[in-house]
Image: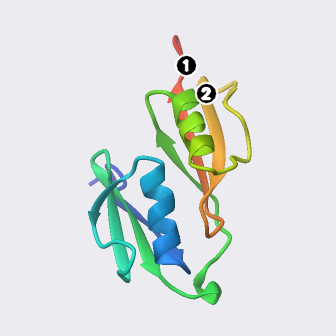
Amino acid sequence: MTVERISAVTLVTVDMARSVAFYEALGFRLRYGGAAADFTSFTVGDGYLNLQAGTRGDTAIWGRIVFWVNDVDAMHARALTAGYRPDTSPTDAPWDERYFHLRDPDGHELSFAQPLPGG
């Protein structure tokens, strides 16, 4: 038996409508739930990003989620066009990825990355 992949990640949000708008503006595809739901799911490749309604006391500092995209610079531009301010600009990393970081409305850190050619 081996662990093969992550099926889903669930994040707590204190404002579902705001969080759904944020992820939809970045191009995430809504699977079910939505602005008025207590639980929302977005399709991400073969897996899911879920949002669970909660209170400020339910959130915790924990780390980041890395999403691979086919064009990091286009995703960065999309975030800026939607009015969001990423923590970093697209950067080539020594581990052969181009990436940038962006926090969602509840402070969860998201990293959008793509492999560098030859990496």
Residue 7 in sight here? no
Residue 111 vs 119, above or below: the answer is below
Which residue carries the number 2 mark?
Answer: 98
Residue found at x 39% / y 74%: 35
Could you say where residue 28 lies in the image, as x and y percent from the top left? 39, 51
Residue 5 in sight here? yes
Residue 78 relative to residue 43: left or right = right
* Camera-side residue of 90 and 64: 90
Color style of the picture: rainbow
Label 2, secondary structure: give it. Answer: strand
Could you say where residue 26 lies in the image, as x and y percent from the top left? 48, 48
Could you say where residue 109 lies in the image, as x and y percent from the top left? 63, 56
- Which three-letter amino acid code belongs to the residue tagged 2? Arg
Quadrant of the snapshot with the C terminus: top right
Quadrant of the snapshot with the N terminus: bottom left
Measure the C-alpha gap from mark 2 to mark 1: 6 Å
Give the image quarter of residue 92: top right
Which residue carries the number 1 mark?
Answer: 116
